[in-house]
Amino acid sequence: MLATLFMTVAVFTFVLLLGNVLKRVLDLLVSQQVSLGLVLEAIGLMIPYVWAFALPMGMLTSALLVFGRFSADQELTAVRAGGISLVSLVSPVLLLSLAMCGLSALVNLELAPKCRAGFKDIVLSAQQSLSSAQLPEGRYIKDFDNFIFYVGKNRKGALEDVTVLYLPDKTNVSTTVVAPRGKWWIDQTNGQLHLKLFEAQSMTILKGDVQNIQIAEGGDVELGPFDLRPKSKDKEKLRVGNMTFVQLLSELRDVENRFALAMITNLPPAESGATLAQVRKQRDKITSPIRVEIHRQLASSFACFAFTLVGIPLGIRVHRRETNIGFFVALILVMIYYTLLLIGAGLDTRPEFFPHIIVWVPNFLFQAVGVVLLWRANRGI
């Protein structure tokens, strides 16, 4: 079981890193915005974050593979003939899953949020500083608010085939500027980038009316300045998803204390009741995402036990030698578990639905189903 667990966790860690991290990090490396050492540091920071998912998935897949092979080789029949019950046989594996829950708790509550915040800081700093390749050629540059740039060629500041898209609402393009030539330079004192386009043409769509188009031909256009300085980390508040368990508890206590002061009022009783109800409603709406994240971190920490409890009897029932069967069943169960978890997390701004309780439903459901299946497997049903 330990050998299979090590293998499956390594596989899932690699797959999750490949799908969620390398695309963003390698994009910076290819554009020469960061060094190889910084890329390795970013990947290292994301390993604990993907472990939050890889550990439960590895535990589930290991249980399916090991006990599927155990059943296929008729070893379960031999064990029962020796007078050993299935519950006694799987007790060490269940204890192992509880130990993995402890490791998952350390990852979910402390390591993963810190490493994720550190990873985002590295990516943000690389995108904003553009230290080694300002306006890299042959790619769309989305590092500046409300603007997207495309540069065909960049020859030490001399640009060719330049396209600038202006998105005032960060979603829809309202103005497109194209120019055959251009140049850029940096104001080192103020940390700003300036862009000048020659023989530029612009097209502006007014009020979403495709037929109402203004085109201005010729002339030089100067855009900017664009701020290259990274945002101050002291002023930038951590997102709820990047907070550790202790930070979340502190944030929740702080918000509740502020609303407790707001509830102290000298209004008449008729007005005071309505005011307090409004304040409580606003408090619940603001604290709900914090509360949901606290419970999500705790609930995810018990996924290893829930997955193992389901994986053991399902592995016995599948009883196939092929590992692809085990992986397929594991993926189906993982999708069901995390879909239910995402439903609860997605309701974090709707406190009336008690989303902090909903995030526990996948654990309760999987554990209940696992207990029933294990009881039936123990009785040979």
Image (tube, rainbow, N blue to C red):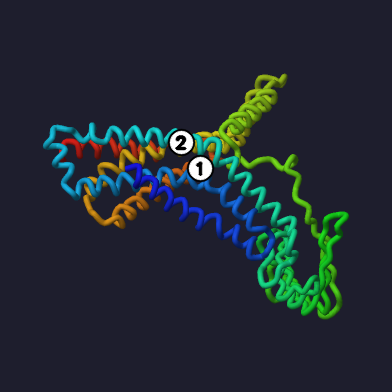
Q: Tell me if residue 174 comes above or below residue 318 in the rendering.
A: below
Under tag 1, what secondary structure?
helix
Task: Check disc 1 and report the residue beneath it.
Answer: 345
Residue at the extreme right of the image, as rendered: 189
Q: Which residue: 67% across, 68% down?
A: 140
Question: How many labels, in total?
Answer: 2
The three-letter code of the residue at mark 2 reads: Leu
Q: Tell me if residue 49 comes above or below residue 263 in the rendering.
A: below
Locate residue 263, reporting x and y percent. Answer: 67, 24
Q: Nearer the viewer, residue 135 or 150?
A: 135
Residue 275 visible here: no
Locate residue 305, reporting x and y percent. Answer: 37, 37
Dividing the picture into quadrants, the one containing residue 80 is top left
Report the disc number at residue 103.
Answer: 2
- C-alpha gap between disc 1 and disc 2: 22 Å
Q: Which residue: 70% across, 71% down?
A: 137
Residue 201 visible here: yes
Judged left or right of residue 335, residue 87 is left
Q: Which residue: 75% across, 64% down?
A: 134
Within 10 angstroms of label 2, few (less than 14), some, or many (20 or more) residues? some
Q: Nearer the viewer, residue 125 or 83?
A: 83
- Of circles 1 and 2, the one toward us is 2
Judged left or right of residue 255, residue 20 is left
Q: Tell me if residue 92 comes above or below residue 73 in the rendering.
A: above
Q: Which residue: 29% across, 39% down?
A: 369
The three-letter code of the residue at mark 1 reads: Ala
- What is the quadrant of the C terminus in the image? top left
Judged left or right of residue 202, residue 14 is left
Under tag 2, what secondary structure?
helix
N-term-proximal mark, 1 vs 2: 2
